[in-house]
């Protein structure tokens, strides 16, 4: 990827970063990351902008 996209919204940027890291993860993990990303984006869009974001779940190496 030539240019990183960032929004300045921590919860959204965490989702973007998780998707950017897919190139380094096994293909079998991609669907779970996209599913989690979709859910996190939906929650971020529905959230109170003053609320603190939840940490993005990390996948264990295995």
Image (tube, grey):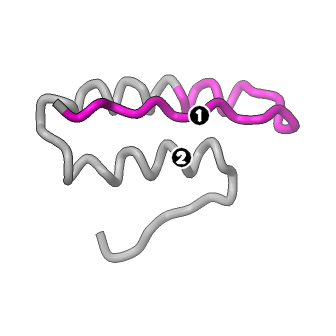
Nearer to the camera, 14 or 48 = 14
Nearer to the camera, 30 or 57 = 57
Question: Against 46, is 4 above or below?
Answer: below
Residue farthest along the left direction in this orientation:
27
Where does the N terminus fall, quadrant-wise? bottom left
Residue drawn where x is 69% and y is 51% of the image: 9
Spot occupied by residue 33 in the image (x, y as percentages of width and height)? 33, 32
Q: Which mark is residue 55?
A: 1
Q: Is residue 61 left or right of residue 39?
A: left
- Mark 2, mark 1: which one is toward the viewer? 1
Secondary structure under badge 2? helix
Residue drawn where x is 22% and y is 35% of the image: 61
Spot occupied by residue 7 in the image (x, y as percentages of width and height)? 62, 58
Pointer 1: residues within 10 angstroms few (<14), some, or many (20+)? few
| CB-based contact (under 8 Å), mark 2 and mark 1 | yes
Residue drawn where x is 63% and y is 24% of the image: 43
Residue 51: image quadrant is top right
Q: Which residue is mark 2?
A: 14
Is 58 colored magenta in this rendering?
yes
Nearer to the camera, 57 or 60 = 60
Q: Which residues are magenta?
A: 40-61
Pointer 2: residues within 10 angstroms few (<14), some, or many (20+)? many
């Amino acid at each position: 990827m030539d240019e990183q996209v960032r929004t300045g919204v921590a919860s959204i940027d965490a989702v973007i970063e998780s998707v950017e890291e897919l190139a380094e993860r096994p293909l079998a993990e991609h669907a779970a990351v996209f599913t989690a990303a979709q859910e996190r984006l939906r929650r971020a869009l529905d959230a109170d902008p003053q609320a603190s974001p939840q940490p993005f779940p990390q996948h264990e190496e295995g």
